[in-house]
Amino acid sequence: MEGRNDCFTDEELESARLIAMSYDVNATVFAGPRVGTTYDMSEACKRCGAGARQTSAMIIDGEYLHRLEGRRAASTSYDDVLADEKLARTLAESGLTGISFRGVFAAFEKRGHIQLPWRQLCAAHTMPPLSPRSTGIVPSELCACGRSGFDTPSEIPTRLVYRASDLVDIHDVNVTWEWFGDSRFDGDVRDALFPAPWFLVTPKIWRIFQGAGVTGFDWLPIRVVDDE
Ligand SMILES: [Zn+2]
């Protein structure tokens, strides 16, 4: 979703039902299964890992720690959204729905794990599948589960489209049913490359991030069509 050249006005973002947030790919911190974060795979696709449910704090690679410096929010290589403690506290006190927080640790080869003054934002709600009217999301090596194996070619603007009825159960933070990115999974989580869902938030979250002076994120409003 990164590198899209569309810019949306504050009014467009304010009036969106949901906004997909994506982070500068060159600034993400490496984290996830290969760094020691654990996942429950009982409901996940056995081939691609889509549906993996995180069961531990978020572990990031200590080598990437410098990428958090001077930031108030950031994203992992798997689109997990991270916020510094102060921003996390603001979010926690804002009466948001469907959000929870996990600790964030840095893993160092010699020194083990060190807890960071950061929190991961977690979404309880998974959206229904996107409307086929979405654009720029092209099945390329679609997994048998239907949830992963999409290309997002940069020459086609990414548009996430949902039907009005898909929005009935939304919260302030949500994840897509679809998972994006490459996958390599042979049953061993510690060696896995998982695809990841996109993080969809209400304008409330966007406002709080704006107010905190967060930079580095692209904000893409979803589109809504009538049910067919
Ligand atoms: Zn799959």
Image: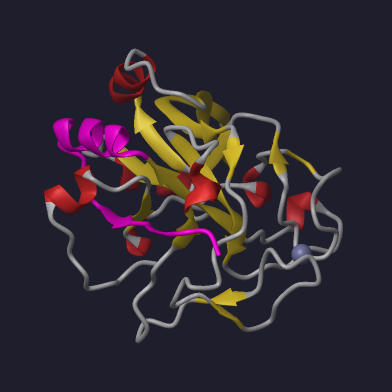
Residue extending farthest to the bottom is 155
Residue 148 shown left or right of residue 100 in the figure: right
| One can see residue 227 in this view | yes
Q: Could you tell me which residue is drawn at 44 percent across and 83 percent down? A: 153
Does residue 216 sit above or below 53 in this rendering? below
Q: Could you tell me which residue is drawn at 22 percent across and 73 percent down? A: 5
Residue 68 shown left or right of residue 173 in the figure: left
Q: Residue 157 is drawn in which quadrant?
A: bottom left
Is residue 209 on the magenta stretch?
yes
Is residue 5 on the magenta stretch?
no
Residue 124 spot, x, y in % from top left: 59, 32
Does residue 160 sit above or below 66 in this rendering? below
Q: Could you tell me which residue is drawn at 44 percent across and 27 percent down? A: 119
Tell me how many marks there are.
0
| One can see residue 110 in this view | no
Render colour scheme: secondary structure
Q: Residue 126 is drawn in which quadrant?
A: top right
Residue 79 spot, x, y in % from top left: 48, 51
Residue 117 spot, x, y in % from top left: 38, 23
- The quadrant of the image that shows the N terminus is bottom left
Q: Which residues are magenta?
A: 202-228
Does residue 135 sit above or below 168 in this rendering? below
Residue 5 shown left or right of residue 118 in the figure: left
Residue 40 spot, x, y in % from top left: 79, 39
- The quadrant of the image that shows the C terminus is bottom right
Q: Could you tell me which residue is drawn at 65 percent across and 74 percent down? A: 149
